[in-house]
Image (cartoon, helix red, strand yellow):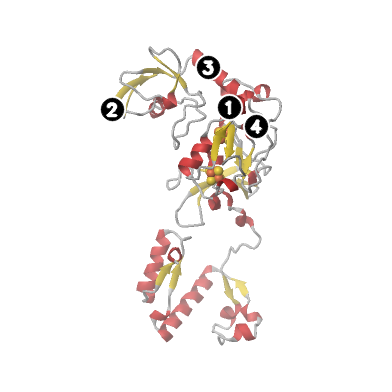
Amino acid sequence: MVTLSINGKQVQVPEETTVLRAAQRLGIEIPTLCDHPDLHPLGGCRLCLVEVKGGKQFNASCALPVSEGMEVTTESPALAEARRDVLKLMLHGYHDAGYANGQSAPTELVHWATHYGLDVAEHQAKEAHYPINADPNPVVWVDMNKCIQCGRCIRACAEVQGRFVWQMTGRGFDSHPIAGVNNLMLDARCESCGACVAYCPTGALDNKPSMGAGLPEKKVTTTCGYCGVGCQFDLNVKDNQVIRVTSNPQAPVNGMHLCVKGRYGYDYIHHPERLTKPRVRRYLLEAGDTPKPSAPQQNPTPLWDWVETDWDTALGITSRKLQSIRDSYGAESIGILTSAKCTNEENYLMNKLARQVIGTNSIDHCARL
Ligand code: SF4
Ligand code: SF4
């Protein structure tokens, strides 16, 4: 362990911890843009500068390992001035064309620029240098005019998603991320997970389906219904409609990570054909008996149409039918297929239902098929 002091407070941390993480452990906030706790440090944006006693220059705390007896200062007029200069340089190559992006909070760049007293509109580039919405993929909005070359998208795609789509090209003010060797994103093996969007601190990458959707009124944390992994995220809601999904860093299973279904596959929620109540064949409600097996093919009748009912009725019919099949043909005549869309607990209960209630071992899971 290494003992150091930050702003006069002592802290003990394991060797190879960075000064930034040691400060965070003490509850001291140091401004950052290229840093993210999920990603390897880059030391690129220089916003997290700190003073180390005896040092000749400011150091980027995200890439500075702790050392025994180190004395660090994270706030001073000189540091504030240095950070302001760093932000001015970033804004020099930044241009916000003013379109509505559907984000409720300022981006991290705007937050820190405002924090250090900079008016973004005044300091930003006067015109765009890159096309807005530059990639035709259906989900990731690309506006490199807002890019500050922090490299978070590159590291998120490589380290979180394992796709290595993005890389940096160019030099100086011309440097910016490109997909593949300047391909379209989908041609560069992008699988539309939106991780690069989630980690981008400026809105240079954004959620295309949410552009122009307005500002969310609230966020509701929920668990994804697409599979049994149990990823959590925040539904951004406006007028009772989901307009955006954002990562919830506190999600215990997935953190910031989501797949394309969880992040972008929410239009089914308000789809007019979405089933929201159980349905049964009408004959089951009216006749309470099974028609001859050939009836639906040879002579369809209105009795075979689907009707909405309540859960008690639907589950009552299901259990009566299962019981009658088991009584007539034996328990082994019944097989049960469960689903990866269910939770582990639900699948466990189906296992109990099959083996202990119905008495069959014929139970399987769609993930094995
Ligand atoms: S959407 Fe996912 S796979 Fe595609 S570039 Fe971004 S992080 Fe990589
Ligand atoms: S697109 Fe966003 S995440 Fe990627 S380098 Fe630019 S500002 Fe950083």
In this rendering, the label closer to the viewer, 2 or 4: 4
Q: Give the answer, above or below, for where 15 lies relative to 155.
A: above
Q: Which mark is residue 171?
A: 1
In this rendering, the label closer to the viewer, 1 or 2: 1
Q: Which mark is residue 279?
A: none
Q: Earlier in the sequence, mark 4 or mark 1?
A: 4
Instruction: Give the residue pinned by disc 4.
Output: 145
Residue 87 is situated, as x and y percent measured from the top left of the image, at 57, 22
> What whole-number distance in Å separates the C-alpha atoms at marks 1 and 2?
40 Å
Q: Give the answer, above or below, for where 314 lies relative to 76.
A: below
At 39% from the left and 76% from the top, the residue drawn is 358
The amino acid type found where label 1 is placed reads: Arg
> What whole-number distance in Å separates the C-alpha atoms at marks 4 and 1?
15 Å
**Ligand 2 is in which quadrant of the figure?**
top right
> What whole-number distance in Å separates the C-alpha atoms at marks 3 and 1?
23 Å
Q: Earlier in the sequence, mark 2 or mark 4?
A: 2
Q: Which mark is residue 1?
A: 2
The amino acid type found where label 3 is placed reads: Ala
> What whole-number distance in Å separates the C-alpha atoms at marks 2 and 4?
44 Å
Residue toward you, 176 or 345: 176
At 60% from the left and 28% from the top, the residue drawn is 110
Residue 217 is situated, as x and y percent measured from the top left of the image, at 62, 42
Q: Mark 4 and mark 2 in contact (Cβ < 8 Å)?
A: no
Residue toward you, 141 or 119: 141
- Crowding near pointer 1: few (<14 within 10 Å), some, many (20+)? few
Q: Which element carries disc 4, helix, strand or loop? A: helix
